[in-house]
Structures are given as C-alpha cells and as structure tokens.
Image: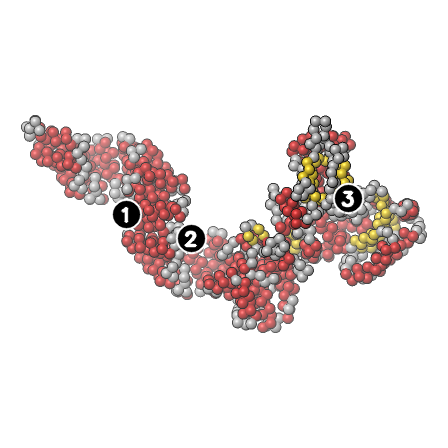
Amino acid sequence: MRTELFCQTLDQELDDLLVEYQADEVLQKLKQPEQKKSYAFLLWFLRFYSSTQIHFRDNITEGKDDSSCDIILSKPGADKCNCFYIIQSKWRKNPLKSNGTSDDIKKALSDFEAILHGTRIPGKNIRFNNQYSDLKNHLAENGDVKFIFLMLAPYNDDIRSNVTDNIRSFTYNHPTSVDIIDLNRLKYDFIDKRYKRIQPDNPLDYLHNPESAEIKLNIERISNETEQGDYIRVIKPFESYIFFIKPKTVFELFDTYGFHLFAQNIRNPLPDSNYNEKIVDTMTYKPGSFWYFNNGVSAITRILPKAIQRTAEKITITGLQIINGAQTFYSVYRAYKSADLVTRTEMDDNALISIRLIKTNDPDMNRQITLFTNSQNRVFDRDFHANDEIQIRLQHESFQGSIWYEKRRGEFNYANKPDGVEIVSNEIFAHCYLSYYLEQCLSTIPIIEKDKNFLFTARTSHEHGLYEKIFNEDTKFNDMLASLYVYRSCCKIFNWNEEEFPVLFSETGTKKVIVTVFIMPLFKAVANKYAEKYARPEMANLTKWIIKSYKDDNVLLEKIIIFITDFFADLDKKDKKRASQSSAYFDILKIKIEDNEISVDGVDSIRPDVFSHFEIAQKHYYNDEYEEALTACNALLEIQDDHFNALHLMSNILLDLNRYEEAEDYCKKALSIKPKHEQLWYNLGSILRELKKYPEAEAAYHKQIEIKPDHEYAWDGLGNVLENQEKYPEAEDAYRKQIELKPDHEYAWYGLGNTLRSQEKHPEAEAAYRKQIEIKPDHEYAWYGLGNALGNQEKHPESEAAYRKQIEIKPDHEYAWYGLGNALGNQEKHPEAEAAYRKQIEIKPDHEYAWYGLGNALRSQEKHPEAEDAYRKQIEIKPDHEYAWYGLGNALRSQEKHPEAEAAYRKQIEIKPDHKYAWDGLGNALRSQEKHPEAEDAYRKQIEIKPDHEYAWYGLGNALRSQEKPPEAEDAYRKQIEIKPDHEYAWYGLGNALRSQENPRS
C-alpha cells in the first residue's frame, strides 16, 4: 500500500467520521475545515487503537492558537493505578510534505513541559480545565504520565536527528516517556489491523513485556488427604512443571500482556475473529469437560521457583511465552471476557486447563521445543524468522508499493486486501533473490534436502544454511522485487504459473529448473554487457531499470531472457551437465560473457512474439490441449514457415491426435531442415509404424540408429516393425540390442517375448515375459504374454494365474479375459470359461476370437443352440475366421442339422484347406447323411493333412464298413488304435469289422 493510497483511505475515513459525529458539541464549534479534520483525526486515532474508545471523546480538548486538538485522559495501568496520557496531534493537509515537522515536535515538547510544570494557562474550554486540574492532582501524587505526539507526516531520519536531543533532554528532566506516532506507524498498524486482522499495540495502554516480567501465577491445587498428584515436576535436563490453572488466570494474563504472550509462537498472532468457536463453547457451556477435550498449553519461562510448597496457590516466575496452545489460550480469554459474573464463577469452579511450564534460557532449545510441540501441523524454518528485524524491515519497505512481502504464512487476510495489492511470500522472494540478485547457480548449492528448505536455515544450524547469505543489512526490498520481476518475466515468456515456484527446486530436468538455475543468475551479466556495448545509461541501476521495464512491458527484458535461453539450448548435454553441477564452470560462463567471448549481438534480433507463440503451443501440448497447441503452432508458422521447433512440435501433436498422415508430412519437413536430428527419425518411424508402412518405418529406425546407435528406444521400435513384417529372427536381434543398451527397458523384454513366442520358443518367451514383469510388475501386457507362453507349454493353471494377474492390473484388457477363458477351458472349467468369454465380449463386442471361445465353452456344456449363435456372431465379425465355421459345423451336427453342418465344414475348408479338424467334421456330417463315399474321401483328406489325427481313422473305418469294405475298415480301426490305444470306440468298430469277415473268435 503506497503511502499516498493510505492517506487517501485515511482522509475518506476522517470524512466518514465527520458525518457520523456531526452532532458532536465540540465539532459544531469548529468552523475551519482543517480544525474539523484535526478533530476527526483524534476520533479516528481513539477508535482505531482502543477497544473502548467512544467515551474518550469526552477527553478531547480544543487546542489554543493552532488547528490541532489535544487529549488528556486517564486509564488504569497494570497495577490498577491510573496513568495519564497527554496527546497532541498535528493533522496535515499534505501528509507527504514534512516541512516544519521538526518545529511541530519541538513546540509539542514545549507544551508538554508547560503541562508538567503546571504553567499552562487554563482556557475557556471546560473539558480542558477539568482534565488539566485532575492531571495536576495526579502529578502532585507522583502519578505516571505518558506523552504522545500524533502527526500525519513521516518521522524520517532527518527529522529524528533534528529532535533527538530535545526528546532526550525532556525525558532526562522528567521521569516519563514521549511516543511519536507518525504517518508510517499509522500505516503499518492500519495494515496489521485491517489486512492481517492483528490488533496493534495500543499507545494508550501501558505495554508490558512478558518475556522479562516477574509474573505472579495462580495455580490450582486439587490435593486432599488421599491425593497429592496436582502437579508434576521434571528436574533434568530442563526443569519443568505440569500443573493446572483456572480460566480467570488465563484472562488476567492476557488482559495484562495481550498478544505479547505469543511473541515466540510460530503461529500467527490470533486475530479477533479467529478464535476457536468449539473451545469457546466448551468453556462456556461444558466447563467441567474442558480438561478432557483440550490438551492445554505449553510455555517457557526464564526462572521458576525452587520448589512449590504443598499449600502454595501462587508462584512467581520470570518471563512467560506461550509456545503451543495459543488458540486455546486466546479462546479461553475470549470466552471468559464475554461471560457474565455467574458464568465466570461456573467456569472457575469447574474448568481446569493444563499448562506445561519449561525453564530454559537457551534460544536454540526454545526453538526446538517450539518446533516439536507444534509438530501436529508442519512447521517451516521461515516461521521462526517472522519476527526478525530484517523481515519486519523488508515488509515495511514493501508497503511502499503494490506487492506486499509476506513474512509469516497466512498473516494476511487475502479476502480483505486492498484492490491492486498482491501478497508474495518471503520464500518466493528468497528463491528469486538468491538466483537473480546473488547470481547463485541453484543446482550447485543445496536448496532443498530431504524436504528441508535451507533458505531460512541459519548457517550455525546447518552447514548448508543460507539465511544470513540472503537476509542481511545489504538486502533491500527493491532488489528482491527486481528479482521477482525477472522470474515473472520468465513466467510470461514460458507461459508458466508462477505459483508453482516452490516446487521448482525439488524437480530435475524441467525447463523451469533450467531457467531458475541458469537464466536468472546470468541475467545481470548479459544485461550489463548489453548496456555497456550499446551505451544504455538508464540500465546503470539495473534494479530500477528492471522494475520500470517490467511495469512498462519493455520488450528488452524478454529479449535478454530469450537470449540466455537460446544460449543454453545450444550447449551440448555435457556442457549443460557441467554448468549445472559445478559453480566454478558456471562462473566461467559469466566471465566469458563479461569478456565478450560470448557475444550479446543477437539480443536485438530476437523476436519475442515468435518465441511466445512456440511456448504457448508447447504449454498447451504439455497440458494435452492439442487443438489449442495446433492453433498456436499454425500462427507461428504463418510468421516463419521454416521454424524447426514448430514443425517438430506439430508432428508430435498430430501423432498424439492419431492424424498420422499429417504428422508424417510435418516430421519430414522438420527433417529437411535438420536431417541429422537425434530424435526425429525415431518419431518418423513411430508415425510410419502407426500407418502400417512397416518397410518405411524400418528404414527410419535404421536411420535413427545410424545417427545415434545408443538411442534409448529406436531398437525397440525397429524390433516392433520387424515383428509386424514377421521377420522374427531379426526382430529378436533388435530387441536383444535394445536390452543390451537398456537392460531395464520398460517394453523391450515384452517385445522379445512376443517374437520368441512367434518362433515357438515358448520357454524362452516365458523367461522374457518374466523379466519384463520383474522390471515393471504392473506392465499392461506382460502378464498376458506370459499367460500365452505358459498356455503354449500346456501349463494351464499357471497360465490361468497369469491372465488373472493381468486382469487385476487392467480389468478392461482387450485380450486377457479371452486368454483366461482358454486357460479355463483347457482345464475343463467350462462354466468359468463361459463367464470369462462373456466378460471379454462385454469389453470388446467385436473381439476376433471371443465369440468362438464362447461357442466352444457352450458346446462343452451341451448348450448347442447358444453355441450355434455364438459361432454365427463370430462369423459375422470375421467371416474368414480360421476356426469359427468348424465350430459352427460341430454345433449344428450336435443338433442333427447335418446338411447345414456339411455346408459349414465346407466353408471352413474353403477358407483353410489344410484345416486340421474340418475334413474330419465334414466326414462326420456326410456319414450322418449316409453319403459314405464322400465321407470316405473327406476322412482320407483329413488323414493326409494330419496322419496321426485322433478321430479320422475311426471315421474312415466307419465309412468303409458302411460301404461293406470290412478288410479296409479293419485296417483303419487298427490304425486308430495304434494312434490312440484307449480310443473310446475304435476297438468296438474293429470288432464289428472282424465280425463282418465271419471271424467271431477275433
């Protein structure tokens, strides 16, 4: 909040008071606007600082021969004795002009002198005369007096040095104090109260310091003849007590010391509106339950009594700070304050509050106790420094502008902050300041280690502590603000959300880290070299220039950042790594810039609009906002159609959108600009693979491998396209090469497993799949591949387990339920197999095998009509299915639909003439229609294809016997028995054939 804005706000509030108190007797007597404003200024002062301000109006007296007003009032002090406050104010129409302020202070001191000596001449004002008379009586009794000079002007160093001797002389001659409340004090207190919801110290109260005061503390004794346990004493290593206090004690302590009791508490001083309603309700309505519901408070003190007598009800301690339980303490105070006498009595009779009091004079120990007693909510190092003088100074400096420095988490009421004011945490300021202003390459110094932030850690507490390095007498808020603006300029250029800043230093490899690590520390070197080369005197004070340039949208600020970005983009990976790991190497880069070894000539030629379009496109792309990314890329390419990065990004976007033909076009355009790019040939291979242009994709992957033989994915891509061309041995070699380069590759072992299975190397395939699972247990396909490899080895229970694991990982897997159905069917678990196939169909209704599998499971349960429907559905999806017509033929034959079955088998044979079962099925269908010669031909064809067929010789025997060819039938049956000695019908058929040859004994 700039001082001008505060003055405008204050002036408006004074006008509002003049309207509110227009009937005031004193105000009506004042004729001049200046007199009225001065009177309103006093009203505002009383209302702002005091919680019981209204009756103080009776203490306002008119001034004499000037336009100021005086106050003479008395208030009880901590000892219940009255203290008189003498206030003189000086309202100014133009507060920012401090001319004559020194004279005003000296004149006020002269008036105060006259008051103390009793030489002030009474005037016509009855209020003044009465109050002045009471004051003189008070002085005669050696009463306390405090003088306040209230001025609407800044009390700057020049004025302070001019009046210091006068104030020192005044206080030396009189046992009193003089408090000068100036424009800045009013502004800071106004911000505290209005925007932080903190009640500032009231100048009209005698301020006690509980950290050093001797305090009489009432303790509650509950011992009786049988119970002595009303407190606990710990002697080592730190003397401590745990005992009980009453609500009245809490009230009296807070009433005397206020929020100063919480000075060492790392939480915010509690605002009026932030006490805990539940604590208040418990204390008010269930005081007897309070101790059971509340953990109490923890406090530290400097001096404890040596012992507590058994009958003692009060102890004396020196120093008191509530370090945990501030909310409890304050809420009890609020409850007690608002209660009537009867309720207060009930509270004191029934409520007990536990207090743990620890004696310690060790600041480090105090900090540790505070840290661990507040461990229920995470505590940060910055919390411990909120009350440091430098943090207060930096915050006060920030109040001159529209960006306020937050020194304590959550100290501002964001919903109530002034329009145009922004709150920025000291942590963000510290990061920016360290990176930009102190030119620290942040990757070479520890910022965060195991979730420990060293920015607010003292060097004495940790070897990596940076607090003193960042925060010292040389630290100025404007330098911090300039640092923030450099970072925000980066955010603007790269289209980032600056609120993500705190996570930057826990990430690695991101562009944000590169910017904060490299660009910001080099900014001063490049900017200074540019200013020197092109004679830019306005850049001599770089802090001032950055602040102005940022507010004026000076494009040069952005050009310098882009220049450094491009400079680092052109460094090879080795140099980038060295710069990020070695502060010495980073310093060499700065020296090269300063010595012109790195030229800044390219700064002016940079086009931020082109850069911005690309960054916008890239941001949209990373956020999966593809259409927006395409729009930004197209806008850039209209400006510069050969922009390599834009063409490259376009191909990536289109690839992700499955617009492969367009992606191929842009990728090839980008390659025409940089034909040896280390990544683009791989991208092109991936695009061509999606287009099923496998030979071209193979060539692209080979080109990528030629440019970068150790590419981390190219061999895997090559293996994939070779596999799709059924070049399995070559694919196997490619996958093995990929594994050699990257043994823990997330897909290569799976690809190797597939190509081994395609070569019927099932044990090796099994081993490859298991290796893939070891690397990536939740792999989306490896368990399915393992299931297939196990099934091919007839390890059906293991296969079932693998498929189930795949389904657990990916319940909607497009093949795993089908594989599970097969594994179950092979174990004759047909109902379960049916359920698995149905689940597969639910996931993928047009599955190329699941309906066939379902048909088999149904037929195995003799559900032949349903099986027929399933096979027909499979044929509808895949008319040339290699097994479905055969399955349909079986289902039809089981329903004795032999002509239809014959047609189905013939269709299967048409699709796959060498089918290993269809001719046998056809033979059966023909024989059922008594077409025995045709059946014989079908069986003989089946035997020709599969000589060891488990049923065809038996069918042939039947066909021959039906044609009354017993000897040939005999031979066929004997052949069937040779192949399958336990055949369920062949021996019977053989017997019939022998009997037909009139050989009963055989």
As shown in the figure, which amino acid type bears the numbered disc 1? Lys
SS at circle 1: loop
Give the label on residue 761, or none: 1
Q: CA distance from mark 1 to mark 3?
A: 89 Å
Q: CA distance from mark 1 to mark 2?
A: 35 Å
Circle 2 packing at 10 Å, graded few (<14), some (14-19), many (20+), is some
- Labels 2 and 3: the sequence-earlier one: 3
Quarter location, residue 667: bottom left
Visible residue check, residue 613: no
SS at circle 2: helix
The residue identified by callout 3 is 214
Question: Along the line of sight, which residue is nearer the eye, 77 or 844?
Answer: 77
Question: Along the line of sight, which residue is nearer the eye, 1002 or 457?
Answer: 457
As shown in the figure, which amino acid type bears the numbered disc 2? Asp
Residue at image position (12%, 35%) is: 974
The residue identified by callout 2 is 656
Circle 1 packing at 10 Å, graded few (<14), some (14-19), many (20+), is some
SS at circle 3: strand
Q: CA distance from mark 2 to mark 3?
A: 73 Å
Nearer the camera: disc 1 or disc 2: 1
